[in-house]
Amino acid sequence: MTPPATAPTARGDLGDDVATAHILVTTGAGGVGKTTTAAALALAAARAGRRTLVLTIDPARRLAQAMGLEELDDDPRQVELEDLPDGGELWAMMLDMQTTFDRLIDRHATSPERARAIKENRIYRTLSSSLAGTQEYMAMERLHELHEADGWDLLVIDTPPTRSALDFLDAPKRMSSFLEGRLLQLLLRPGLAAGRGIGRMVGASASAFMRVAGKVTGMGLMEDLAEFFRNFEGMYAGFKERAEQVLELLRDPDSRFVVIASPEPPPLREARFFLERLEQEGLHAAGLVVNRIRPEVPRDPSDSAIERVAEAQPDDRQGRSVAGALWLLRDVRNLAGRQRRDVAAALYGVTVPARVDVPLLGGDVHDLAGLDTIATVLTTGKTR
Amino acid sequence: MTLSTPTGLAGFDDLLSSHVVMVTGKGGVGKTTTAAALALAGVASGRRTILVEVEGRQSFSRTFGTARWDYEQREFRPGLWGMAIDPADSVYEYLDRFYGLKRVQWVMERSHALDFVTTAAPGLKDLLLLGKVYDLEIQRRSDGRRRYDLIVVDAPPTGRIVPFLQSPEGVTEIVRVGPIQRQAGSMWEMLQNPQRLRTVVVSLLEEMPVQETIEAVHALRELGVDVGPLVANQVTVPRVSEPQRDQLRDLGASGLREQVTKDGARMSGRTSQLLLDLVRTHRDQVELQERLRDELVGSCALPLLALPLMTSPTFEVPDLEVLADVLALQLGEDGPHAQARFDDTELEAAIAAARPSPVSGGTS
């Protein structure tokens, strides 16, 4: 027997967030439907008369096409929509990490020569794509730029499908601690660390480490690193200040996070950690969206009745059809029950302002009609 | 049982012939489950098998209900070992082995030196992970046999798999001399040799995963890495055929309800209406699944193995054994767990769902 599935958290909708938030950040594990959810939220806002921009990280060509755009790039493009109320506009763009990072360098470098030297350094070229959290940080940086540019009622931003969806919260911190790191200081000014006690030991050992590292990796890497960070000097203050502004913007009550999961344990675990993390950081969760959930099946007939009746069907055309349908009913009930139990287990002890279950719709979302269907569920909690 | 629909793969020896099997796939498609099922199939075939995690997610320890996995290789089921490779442990082992620098570890931990170096030269982290896989592959027992007959790696997802496997090549661009450069060369040889390493790409028969799988297969081939069979995970087992759907539709909600309740079961009008809707969407899904399967097989020209969507009320370790046996049956091997769980018709249906239809698939 399957125990009855229960919903531990009040269901709700994101209607209020779509109508009032200035920034919505969608986040969650890979493959849970973040990009689609972000687009649907933005569409709902445009339909509510807001000038909205959705900023995605994924080169989701299909989604761009669904919105009637050839492709997305770093400049916002307007989506053509009919029957929008006054003021309602939908724009979409795709974040280009490299362009954003380059602009950041141009803004903060102490001279154009230094900016060029940094951009030509091969460490920089790999850094922009790989420093843990850089992608996430650049997304937030771009968000801040757009926020300052003004004129947008709502910015909906999709985060990269990182293994850990938490990374981008750390990104500004990690970036500044990386830039201020002790080892970096040693590399730039080896003399500084020759202090006393632990400092001296670490300093001496770090020099030993650098020798080993040089030997193991070949010297080129270390020289490039040193050159890279020398050029970075003078930029740290600007970077740090910017990182703090970004965090401040995210902490504003009008910036809200929409956590997204599919109804399976691994993405639900990520969603849970994320919800807890938001609370710790003083950030505002709009709610949890559980995508692609199976419809709940009523308790009649019971599982044992299904089995009995299906097996009792005569072995003729109609009997086999009815038996097949009954087995299907049992399959769906089992899956729906499993999904709801997994959701309930993952949310045990976690408070969520709103939880929206988006039902499994046949196939992917291909067009605005599909996005509208999801938008309706997200804003009203109902399929229509 | 003998399957009426061959896969083009003959036995465990065909599927598990490479020393290393790298399992990749789009996020959320069940990469970890597939890797675990492949490892169990390896054990069932008598191979000394190790299951390797590289992304520090502790997925296998959760799946198998063991304590946390770490750098230590431990046997957690008879014939099946497990380990989680961490780049830091890998670099300490490396420095200790090649330079006798065990003591450097403390300094490196204190100064976060490793974070620093792997951050600045990102390919290095992948190289360290891959380096340990290479190390497992070249290890030998005292009698000269390989330490593990089969190494199954839960590899990074399709979005990251190419840079991951490319790391030996990428690093040689940054690091021009020294032992890392030499070892990167040996690793590259392993990656290019189908006897030693192949990738298995897992997909769902849904639109976005199928597109991403096709792109990944082409990118992996471009890289010169062998791509083994594709695995279609969570394949919906057809419960109702197309004519049966039409028949049920004609029967209508009240007819269906009458048929079910005359045998003494309860079924409300609401449930019977819902059931008719479910039958319709089920058929839509099965048809979409068939179309995507043909597209997948057609554009990749690879054998496709099916793992059915398990509709049991829970998903536990015995379900993995069933999945491993479903794989075995598709290779013409025995699959006792699968046969205990499903009747032959269900098994045929599950597996046939992954066979390309004769007209459109498989030959291009």
Image (spheres, coloured by chain):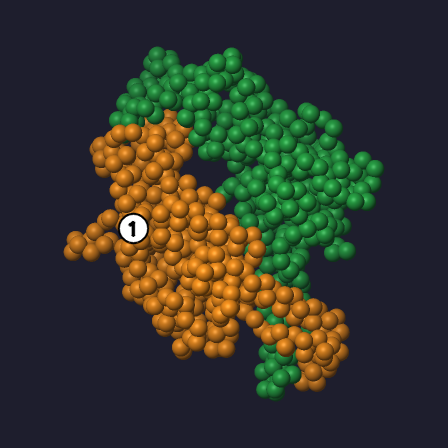
Chain colours: A green, B orange
Foreground residue, A174 or A135?
A135
Q: In the rendered structure, which amino acid carries the disc numbered 1? A: Asn
Of residues A237 and B223, the one drawn nearer to the viewer in this rendering: B223
Residue B363 as seen in the image, left or right of residue A60: left
Eyeballing the image, is A325 above or below B232? below
Q: Residue reaching furthest left?
A: B143
Secondary structure found at label 1: loop
Residue B155 to residue A166: above or below: below
- Identify the residue shown where x is 61% and y is 27%: A246
With B148 as the anchor, is B358 left or right in this view?
A: right
What residue is shown with label 1?
B193
Q: Does residue A209 appear in the picture of this structure?
A: no
Q: Is residue B344 toward the left or the right of residue A250 in the image?
A: left
* Front one among A307 and B285: B285
Q: In which quarter of the image is residue B131?
A: top left
Could you tell me residue B208's position as x and y percent?
56, 52
Quadrant in which the N terminus of chain B appears: bottom left
Can residue B298 be spotted in the picture?
yes
Question: Where, quadrant-wise, is the C terminus of chain B in this rendering?
Answer: bottom left
Give percent across and percent down for residue B16.
33, 60
Please provide percent x and percent y for residue A125.
45, 28
- Residue at 35% across / 12% down in the picture? A191
Identity of the residue drawn at 69% across and 25% down: A149
Q: Which residue is drawn at 36% across and 49% down?
A: B225
